[in-house]
Amino acid sequence: IISLGSMDYVAVASPELYQAHFSDGVSLDALRSCVSVAFNRKDTIQDQWMALCFGATVPLSIHYVPSYEGYLSCCLNGAGWGLVPSIAGSPYIRRGELVELSPDKKVSVALHWQAGMQSSEILSRLGTLVLDVAREHLAPDRFRPT
């Protein structure tokens, strides 16, 4: 297992969803009453973000969307709020298509590359390319220093 670094995720919602549920501010009560989006039942990034922002979590109403494209579409069309990679969400935020729920709060997720010890030459070269791109675009983490 090779550490690639970490990717920051930001909590976002469509402007319409934000206005409907968070016009008085983002709070645990507001989050409890608003639908969120998650990839599957193992996805805990919303809880990590709530704990970071508020020091606590609340049960959420969740739409499960197991594809990145579908997840992002749900955030854009107001089906729920969710956490997206900062690098991918930034253009939508700049254009006003998404609103960050708490601009200074990001969840950092460590990413890893795993390959077998007896990997083929092609997999070995692919792993090297993935690591090179990760070093260019991801922040170092405690497993992969600068």
Image: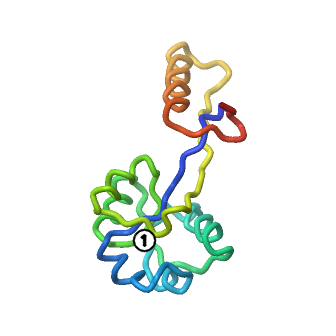
Indicate left or right for 76 with 43 as reference: left
Near-viewer residue (125 or 41): 125
In the rendered view, tell whether residue 126 sits above or below residue 51: above
Q: Assign the C terminus to one quadrant of the image.
A: top right
The image position of residue 32, as x and y in percent, is 52, 83
- Determine the image quadrant of residue 43: bottom right
The image position of residue 59, as x and y in percent, is 58, 80
**Residue at the spot 42% in from the left edge and 71% down from the top edge:** 63
Residue neighbourhood size for the residue with mark 1, other residues' Cα within 10 Å, grouped as few (<14), some (14–19), many (≥20): some
**Residue at the spot 49% in from the left edge and 84% down from the top edge:** 30
Near-viewer residue (1 or 93): 93
Near-viewer residue (98 or 113): 98
The image position of residue 142, as x and y in percent, is 72, 41
Q: Assign the N terminus to one quadrant of the image.
A: top right
Total marks shown come to 1
Disc 1: which residue: 63
Near-viewer residue (75 or 18): 18
In the rendered view, tell whether residue 29 sits above or below residue 89: below
Name the residue type under label 1.
His
Disc 1, SS: strand
In the rendered view, tell whether residue 116 sits above or below residue 110: above
